[in-house]
Image (cartoon, rainbow, N blue to C red):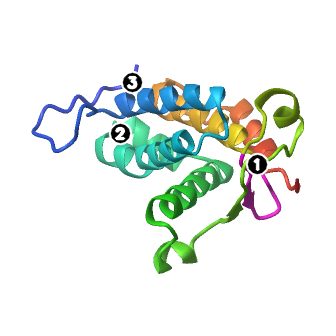
Amino acid sequence: MLEKNNYTGPSLRVGLHLCEELFEKLKWEYSQLQDDWSNSYITFNFVLTANHLYADWVTSQGTKIQRQKVNRLPDLGKQLFAVLRDVANASKHWKLDGKNDKKKVVESVSKPIIGDWFAYFISGPVPYISVGEANPSLPELASVTIKCFEWILVSEELNFPIKLAEELQLVFLPRRN
């Protein structure tokens, strides 16, 4: 059973105080994205929420097990969160500062386009993120982001799920649209 970290002290935050609560917000944003993958407002909120949940909330408020899971992420899981970091910081601050620019993994983010069969048949135009030789779509990245947080925050499994590791490999498979 996972330990709970129930914060009860004074706060400067509005409404959300636990990692699990911010994760619920992220899942709500994900459900909104599924209705309109090209909505820049929802995309902006999703990447910022995901980045801060990973980079700030789990390290500051998460349980010991949740923090250990972050440290157990495979390289492609770490790359996923580096992608979210780059896009969130560039979106929020207009561009990456010198420190973040040196460690960036994202080369570019496309405008919403039809770049694969999922976009052609199901979602309509979506943004694609250029990462090395890979060019994952926003729907692919958002899906594995939710699944990674499910493992970090909810799952009682301590080892990273094999199926999710395989899915991350597919997301970051070298390809160009």
Residue 70 is a magenta residue: no
Dot 3 or dot 2: first in sequence order is 3
Location of mark 1 (residue): 136
- Of 147 and 1, nearer the camera is 147
* Residue 29, horizontal then vertical, whole percent: 51, 32
Is residue 145 found left or right of 177 in the rendered image?
A: left
Kind of residue sitting beneath label 1: Pro
Q: Main secondary structure of the magenta part?
A: loop
Rendering quarter of residue 118: top right
Is residue 80 found left or right of 63 in the rendered image?
A: right
Mark 2 packing: few (<14 Cα in 10 Å), some, or many (20+)? some
- Of 115 and 154, nearer the camera is 115
Farthest bottom residue in view:
98
**Which numbered tag is attached to residue 53?**
none
Kind of residue sitting beneath label 3: Leu
| C-alpha gap between disc 3 and disc 1 | 32 Å
Of circles 3 and 1, the one toward us is 1
Dot 1 or dot 2: first in sequence order is 2
Location of mark 3 (residue): 2
* Residue 120, horizontal then vertical, whole percent: 87, 34
Residue 131 is a magenta residue: yes
* Residue 166, horizontal then vertical, whole percent: 77, 38
| C-alpha gap between disc 3 and disc 2 | 9 Å
Kind of residue sitting beneath label 2: Lys
Q: Are marks 3 and 1 in contact (CB under 8 Å)?
A: no
Location of mark 2 (residue): 64
Identify the secondary structure beneath mark 1.
Answer: loop
Rendering quarter of residue 17: top left
